[in-house]
Amino acid sequence: MDIQLKRGLLDVCVLAAIGDSDAYGYQIIKDISPHVEITQSTLYPILRRLEEADCLSVRSEEYNGRLRKYYRVTPAGKSRIKEFKQDWAEIQEIYSFIAERTQAT
């Protein structure tokens, strides 16, 4: 799969996994893992990138004596999910065209 396409898909997967409630890294990985293979070394740069793009807000809270970061989807993040869904409909149309034209191959 094209690396840029996969990167975009993973960004939206992370936003969707967080959803409407606060989530922390391990929880996000656990929620996504049944559907997409993702590791901590992949997740945390995505979270930073989404935070820098104002798609996520972050707060720290103490949990068992350690600080844990909680992520929340911002209105910009919700817009990104909405845009992705609109783009996906177009991608499905393109896929259908390609699949139809190349059935014999």
Image: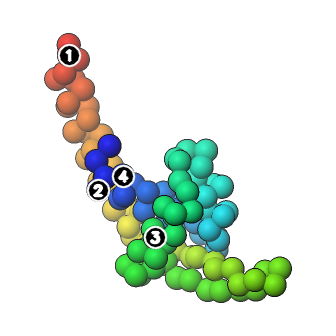
Tag 4: Cα neighbours inside 10 Å, few (<14), some, or many (≥20)? few
Q: Position of residue 103 (x, y in %)?
A: 23, 17
Residue 53 pos. (x, y %): 37, 79
Q: Nearer the viewer, residue 3 or 105?
A: 3
Identified at 29% across, 56% down, the residue is 4
Which residue type carries mark 2?
A: Gln
Visible residue check, residue 75:
no
Residue corresponding to mark 1: 105
Per the image, the residue denoted by label 2 is 4
Task: Tell me which label, 3 or 1, sits earlier in the chain.
Answer: 3
Do tag 4 and tag 2 residues touch (Cβ < 8 Å)?
yes
Q: Is residue 67 something one can see in this rendering? A: yes
Count residues near mark 2 (Cα–Cα under 10 Å), then give few for <14, some for 14-19, many for 20+. Answer: few
Q: In the image, what residue type sits under mark 1?
A: Thr
Disc 4 designates what residue? 6
Element marked by disc 3: helix
Closer to the chain start, of discs 2 and 1, is 2
Residue at the extreme top of the image, as rendered: 104
Q: Is residue 88 above or below residue 57?
A: above
Identify residue type, mark 3: Pro
Q: Quadrant of residue 71?
A: bottom right
Marks 4 and 1 sit apart, C-alpha to C-alpha, by: 25 Å
- Residue farthest to the right, as pictured: 64
Q: Earlier in the sequence, mark 3 or mark 2?
A: 2
Work out how far the residue at label 2 is from the one at label 1, CA to CA, in angstroms. Answer: 26 Å
Front disc: 3 or 1? 3
Relative placement, left or right, of 22 versus 88 is right
Occupied quadrant, residue 100: top left
| Label 4 with label 3: CB-CB less than 8 Å | no
